[in-house]
Image (spheres, rainbow, N blue to C red):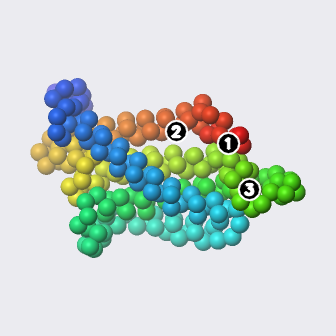
Amino acid sequence: MNTLAAAWAWLTSAAHWSGPGGVWQRLGEHLYLTVVCLALSCAIALPVALVLGHLGRGGALAINISNAGRAVPTFAVLVLLLLTPIGGYGDWPTIIALVLFAVPPLLTNAYVGMRGVDPEVVRAARGMGMTGSQLLRRVEAPLALPLILTGVRIAAVQLVATATLAALIGGGGLGRIITAGFNLADTPQVVAGAVLVAVFALLVEAVFEAVQKFGPRWARGGAG
């Protein structure tokens, strides 16, 4: 039996999906880690990008700083965090490393989206007497939403792929299937784990694409 056939046999075995350490449990852990990190990344990056994009100042510096962080491998950040007092607090080293990894695409896309709003529309809104906060909330942010959602989609897919690193420090997620396969010298299990991560990432990509294409008007960049 070749490796691909053996990996398929592993994936189609009910014994590997249920119970402690089964695929469903690892998938739930992976989803939880992805959602938490994405939420924290959005809470950090999007307000900064929206405000800087509205003001038109400081955005280039913020983007360059965040992109410089991408030059440092996430695994290296994770190892450094393990050597600090944070390393003893469960999933927090992984969460912090993943959040730092997800911030750049969120910040960049949101800022570019804000700066790409038609200046004529902005001037018209100001001429109608809108305040700065009203302009941001009612005009600029809705028009920038397609690019903002693109950044969220990119960050989400990257997080699904990179969250496998949690397994290297004893965390949960689909990465545990891969590391267990390495420990057992079980190549089909390694391949099966990699396929699960790839399929999960593709599903996340498909969900965001569907929201942007078929979702409510606000998710497609409408102002109302």
Neighbor class of circle 2 (other Cα within 10 Å; few <14, some 14-19, many 20+) is many
Q: Position of residue 108 (x, y in %)?
A: 58, 59
Q: Local crowd at mark 1 within 10 Å, few (<14), some, or many (≥20)?
A: some
Quadrant that contains the C terminus: top right
State how many labels appear.
3
Q: What residue is drawn where x is 78% and y is 60%?
A: 131
Q: Position of residue 52 (x, y in %)?
A: 65, 65
Q: Which mark is residue 102?
A: none
Residue, disc 1: 221
- Is residue 120 among what the camera can see? no
Label 1 sits on what residue type?
Gly
* Mark with earlier residue (2, 1): 2
Residue holding disc 3: 134
Q: Residue at x 37, y 62 (%)?
A: 97
Residue at 28% from the left image edge and 54% from the top image edge: 166
> Is label 3 in a helix, a strand or a loop?
helix
Side of 139 where 8 appears, left or right: left
- The residue sitting at 74% across, 50% down in the picture is 139
From the image, tell me which residue sits under label 2: 208
Asked if the residue at tag 1 contacts the one at tag 2, i.e. Cβ–Cβ closer than 8 Å, the answer is no
The residue lying toward the viewer, choosing from 7 and 112, is: 112
In this view, the residue farthest toward the bottom is 84
